[in-house]
Image (cartoon, helix red, strand yellow):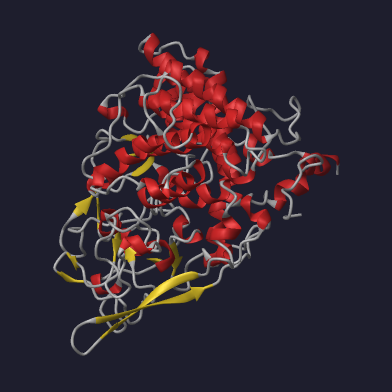
Amino acid sequence: MKAYKLTNRIFLLAILLLSVSCTEIFEESDLNQAPEQELDFEKVFSDYQQYRQYLDYTYLYMPGHLGRMWNSMLCELSDEAEGLGVNVCSPVFNNGAWSGATLPAGTPQANANRELSEMWTNLYKGIRQANMAMENIDKVKNFPTPEIYNRSLGETHFLRAFFYFELIKRWGGVPIFDKSVQLGKDELDIARSSYDDCVKFIVEDCDFAAAKLDLVNAEAETGRATKGVALALKSRVLLYAARPLNNPTNDVKKWEAAASAAWDVIKMNQYSLDVDYVNMFFRPNLGTEIIMNRPRPKMNFEQGHIDNSNFWVRFIVPQGYMGWMGTAVTQSFVNLYEASNGYPISNSLSGYDPQNPYANRDPRLKMTVLYNDRFWYSRKTEFFVGGQDYGSSLVNPMGYSIAKFWPEAHQRYKSTSAYLNYIFFRYAEVLLNYAEAANEAYGPEGAYPGAGMTARAATTEIRQRVGQVPIPTDISGDKDAMRERILNERAIEFSFEEQRWYDVLSLKRGTQLFGSANPIQGMKITKNTNGTFLYEPFVHETRIFLEHMHRYPIPNSEIYKSKVLEQNKGWE
């Protein structure tokens, strides 16, 4: 009886005391499997090769693939996309049905747990491993060089920082464990630290990591942390800390800190925008823009998921191209792509024609979205009612699908293959982090002291890469107006890349953009007898997003175990 009560009191016991078996580097298919054996830690922490494996395994707890919710992409939670069919789990979020309860196994909805209770668990598993690797590094006596020792130590701090940020961007302040814990020796039931205290802890880890990590990695080390990776994480952390959800008094010093952190990456002169925006996502290497990715082997059209490990391109492909059409783009999101003259299509100066809706638009619309009557691979697309890409058994009523993660030549039965690497950080994000923070701290034409780059200049650099004109000054002349254009730029530049959902939550705009105030639209397309088309936007769905949903619910299983862990407001 005493043992039962003790176990029931211990917070995160299963997570923090977990042992895992060694695996080959980046074999992510093992991530969700039960450990096959208890590790002999004396051996692991006495030999460099075994230590290296242990540290490499820790990277696998980084949520790093677009298909991690199996048949749903994260962009379906936001206004970017709509999950179609009976096997998607995104309706759990869209209908406001999510909570701290773990969804029962055996149903498609249970895959939502991968973003909720399982995410919480896996991130704390990663923290425990990072702490173990950090604490035991000096027991390893055969590091090849002092430089590799320093790099390895830096990696442990980066990984811990990354895991804690992934926690706080979803749940707010969380309990901080700065060391591994042992049953009977350490206090395991601890209260949540404040968001600001968590940020301070994460930033300290980032700074420590940046001082230890290499500027670049050898090709065989791709996927491991570098100095730029640690600083890019710091930039993201401080930007989120400055946004309204986490900075309700709008403390300008937080915006200044975020601008400074982004500038630290820019002034490295280590990165630049990839000239090929379309094919950057299929690179066999990092190129000039990608700061950190998760390397994948080449995959053909038929390959994909191995227990939550890869993105299967067939999920986003219309039935007309022999895909499964699981994720469709919304008209609500397509509306955010500006006219080619830089004006929103809602502005009369844009020249937007509702019956020729894809003419003279931001070039990234064609680069990222498949829309009706454009050429793709061997024919023009048919998203009109009754068309091949509208579908028959796998119907897509929305009028669009994703092109961004589907190489055009990558077709079924064509013996093609492609790299589909997941990108954690790229230089475009750093530039837009800087633009957002500099605008809030100094205005559109201001710059972080000594930076020599204004908020406007940072956005212009992004837009010039794809041939889009700078943001017109008459719609971005002050801080408030420029803020809206920068946030729109983030939405377009990072479309479907798992940025917008978290951006909107941290900006505290979920009720405005993801709730009943902004119903999700599709585009009904009818082909006329003369070959022209009639375009009719329609309301597809009114979603539920309430104020308390800007923070995730802590899993009830963790709340019930603890005497001090408090649930986020609204989820009690």
Q: Position of residue 296 (x, y in %)?
A: 31, 43
264 and 326: which is toward the camera: 264
For the point 47% across and 51% down, the residue is 500
For the point 60% across and 40% down, the residue is 168
- Res 266 quadrant in image: top left
Q: Is residue 144 above or below residue 74?
A: above
439 and 261: which is toward the camera: 439
Q: Position of residue 358 (x, y in %)?
A: 27, 66
- Res 136 quadrant in image: top right
325 and 276: which is toward the camera: 276
Q: Quadrant of the C terminus?
A: bottom right
Numbered marks: total: 0
The answer, for residue 362, to whether it is visible in the render is yes
Q: Quadrant of the N terminus?
A: top right
For the point 60% across and 38% down, the residue is 124
Q: Is residue 353 left or right of residue 259?
A: left
Instruction: Name the outermost residue toward the bottom.
Output: 529
Q: Is residue 485 left or right of residue 258?
A: left
Q: Position of residue 343 (x, y in %)?
A: 35, 56
Q: Position of residue 106 (x, y in %)?
A: 55, 66
The answer, for residue 41, to whether it is visible in the render is no
Instruction: Name the outermost residue toward the right.
Output: 1
For the point 42% across and 23% down, the residue is 264
